[in-house]
Amino acid sequence: MSNVPPPPTNLRGAVDLSSLVNRPAPADAAAGQPAGEALTLPSLYFEGTDANFNDFIDLSMRVPVVVDLGTARSEQSTQFSAVLDRVIGGFTGRLVLVKIDVDANPQLTQAFQAQAVPTVAALVGGRPVQLFAGVVPEEQLREVFEQLLQLAAQNGVTDTVTVEGGPDAEGDSEASAEPAPEPPLPPLHAEAYEAIDRGDYESAIRAYRTAIAQDPRDTMAAAGLAQVSLLARLSGHTADELRAAAADAPGDAAAQLGVADLDISGGHIEDAFDRLLTVFPTLDAESKDEVRARILEYFEIVGVDDPRVGKARARLASLLY
């Protein structure tokens, strides 16, 4: 989860955005300015969507664009997003950050092959660059971005951003000021988060289970346990491997659960629910119990108030009763 990204000579485009975007030529105003110039923008931080992403591909012709794919449903993703804000601000306009909500932007989630949150990528000169998935320690994160800047320089992407009005401009405090610190995590949550950071999913699972045992009403621990359990199950597997196994054994519960895990991690919530609820009536009692437990775990990950959960819950109830 905290794999060290490759050095800049090995960084390469990892996703194919051709099915998502048909990028027009950069705007005249941007194309007419030489590299190494200051580029004035309203902020260093932006919200990316399926509809506006062309703008950021164009922007990456001037300055490297870091892409954070995450979700507010994940405590881990939210915490790491705040770290990204702080680190990007420390690069004084040499990088900009685009945040993408994987729940609301399925095309971008699929295009960047985001199988976990957070997933961090970049755009340099209009081309996607794979960075890492999961949480990376702050010091290592700075090293990754230094590597990214070296890659950008090799491709002539060397402009810097000046925020409109400067650091004291009215209404620009979000872009110029350091983000407010997050409230401290409860001790067991912090223990789990640190374990996830070093890729020790089993320790994180134990910490969350202890938190739930101490307080069965700890909904954040329940969600965290579901999320890290998902990461643990996916660890060591590839998407091609999981999908091939499911295709070869359409009636096998374990194979279908593997692809459902993959779909949930990539934000394809309805696909995961439909896959499991379709195979459910064909299974024996033991397999039905396993699939039912996994679906309930997904409810924790997605959020019980999500309308997709409501639909899946009603469909599951009809199959059970």
Image (spheres, grey):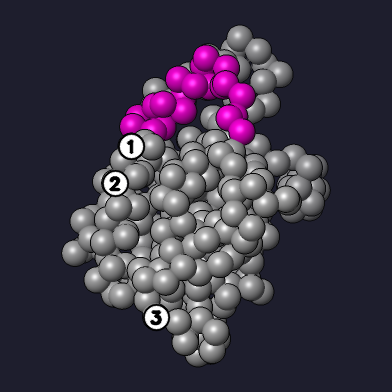
Taking the spot 50% from the left edge, 69% from the top edge, the residue there is 39
* Measured Cα–Cα span from mark 2 to mark 3: 27 Å
Nearest to the eye among marks 2 and 3: give it: 3
Taking the spot 31% from the left edge, 41% from the top edge, the residue there is 140
In the rendering, at what x and y percent does residue 22 appear? 53, 87
Callout 2: few (<14), some (14-19), or many (20+) C-alpha neighbours within 10 Å?
Answer: some
Residue 135 image-quadrant placement:
top left
Taking the image as drawn, is residue 188 in sight? yes
* Measured Cα–Cα span from mark 2 to mark 1: 7 Å
Most foreground residue, 153 or 235: 153
Which amino acid lies under the numbered mark 1 shown in the image of this protein? Glu
Which amino acid lies under the numbered mark 3 shown in the image of this protein? Pro
| Image-based side of 290 in relation to 62, left or right | right
Dot 2 lies on which element?
helix
Q: Which residue is mark 1?
A: 139
Q: Is residue 118 above or below residue 290?
A: below
Which label number is shown at residue 35? none
| Image-based side of 42 in relation to 11, left or right | right
Taking the spot 59% from the left edge, 54% from the top edge, the residue there is 166
Q: Earlier in the sequence, mark 2 or mark 3?
A: 3
Q: Earlier in the sequence, mark 3 or mark 1?
A: 3
Taking the spot 57% from the left edge, 58% from the top edge, the residue there is 163
Callout 3: few (<14), some (14-19), or many (20+) C-alpha neighbours within 10 Å?
Answer: few
